[in-house]
Amino acid sequence: MTVVKMPQLGETVIEGTILKWLKQEGDQVALDEPLFEISTDKVDTEVPASAAGVLSKIMVPEGETVAVGTELAEISDGGAGAAGAPGAASQLAAPGSGGAETSSGTTGGDDAPSAPAPPAAAPAPQPAAAPVAASAQAVAPPPADRGPRSQILSPLVRKLAGEHGVDLAQVPGTGTGGRITKNDVLGFVASRGVGAPASAGATAPAPAAQPAPASAPAPAAVAQVAQVAPVAVGGGEEIVPVSHIRKQIAQHMKASLEISARAWNAVEVNMENVARLRERTKDGFKAREGFGLTYMPFVTRAVSEALLAHPMVNSELRGEEIAVKHFVNMGIAVSYDEGLIVPVLKGTDTMNLLGIARGINDLAARARAKKLQPDEVHGGTFTITNPGPFGSLISVPIINQPQTGILGFDTVEKRPVVIDDTIAIRHMVYISMSWDHRVIDGALASQFLARVKQNLETWDFAGDLGL
């Protein structure tokens, strides 16, 4: 008997979501034959069987997110005569499965545990506790009802809890097995921030049908409405399921806006020297390298140097401390058929223009072909997004947490500008940055963008191209 476990696909990967079982209970499995697909941070991977035999038992259903090392299935050496029954029994054994499904944001399984039920019943005898802020901890769900996976905490959940001073022992988990999700923490913070109800507001709205208590369980209510709304289909409408990639993007972007104090500013950059160099060398570059020379390597090179000059922009807020990075791992936003992914080109501060161009091309090509490794979307210190090829004139991107800033590089176009009191036509572009006001201020953000502008307008990039 071989036990199949959730593999460690990268140093930074701590959990994965089962997207699809490629074999069913009772099927014959060959060694190294694809057994199931998993998703880790928008990177989908086929996992091969570690042994040959019969898939006798599937212990984790499709759509469920579990920690690395969790037992997923069993492969037996013998026949599959009784293989079906144990698997079915293991799925039916989970309380609250089937119709009692809840929306947890990170899980899509059908075995929502008993965690959501106790909060509605346990605090019911305590309607008078709502006005007392200090009573929030007293009405927390009993530890026995928290579920077997309540202690599996993602780094983002821990980060949110630390930033908002949340005791996770007081947060009821709506994830599989009582697992605490990002939405659980944010919902707890939102209910506590309303004022009087604190965490009790989320668990004790029953005593009176008043607006204040009813607003506390908003996250769960919104999630339920989101599931019911597609039932009403009007003429000309098409209902499509939300993909797991889209769910991850939505969760990450929403959490970023709720966590950070986002501010924004922009500069206009004269790209004439870069545009002329690119025009002169693009044919020879493509003939030698096999891919086109875009503006992105120039911008990445200029931004990398500016980050070393202003390292606070290249930092990360960790509770009461700021981690300042004196190296640059550049996140490059890549649009592909399923949405958006941000692979990381590591060590751009040590690369010349040619090395950066090769690295970006490689990451973008493999991202669109869905061949990235999980570790290649982790470890970024700053991000650049480039909506320019789609005609965007100026953009306001959302910060890629836990970073402090993200730079938007938009359309390079010819515009009339005043140079030495004369009007001239030049290749111009708006470069903008969204930044976290908890870490940096407007003066530093402006100084950083001015440095990027100076680099792009004055540097001679020709030597880096080797042409």
Image (cartoon, rainbow, N blue to C red):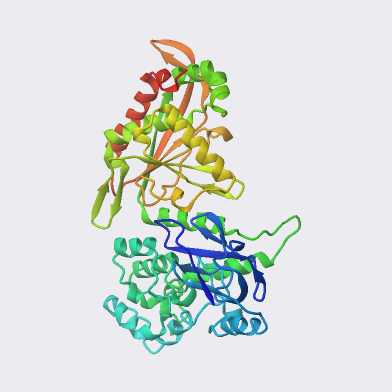
Q: Is residue 77 left or right of residue 9?
A: right
Q: Is residue 441 left or right of residue 286?
A: left
Could you tell me which residue is drawn at 31 percent across and 46 percent down?
A: 437
Name which quarter of the figure residue 10 lies in: bottom left
Most distant residue in the right direction = 235
The vertical placement of 134 against 462, above or below, is: below
* Residue with the most extreme bottom position: 125
Residue 93 higher or lower than 64, as above or below: below
For this view, does 247 lie left or right of residue 80? left
**Total number of numbered labels?**
0
362 or 139: nearer the viewer: 362
Q: Residue at x 53, y 47 (%)?
A: 340
Image location (x, y in percent) of residue 175: 47, 72
Question: Does residue 441 show up?
Answer: no
Residue 381 point in image, percent of width and height: 36, 44
Query: 144 or 76, which lies in front?
Result: 76
Give the percent coordinates (x, y) of residue 324. 26, 45
Front residue of 70 and 115: 70
Identify the residue at horizontal 23%, vertical 56% (top origin). Answer: 320
**Residue 269 showing in the rendered view:** yes
Position in image of residue 407 (x %, y %): 41, 38
Q: Nearer the viewer, residue 434 or 6?
A: 6
Q: Return the residue found at the far left.
A: 320
* Quarter that holds the N terminus: bottom right
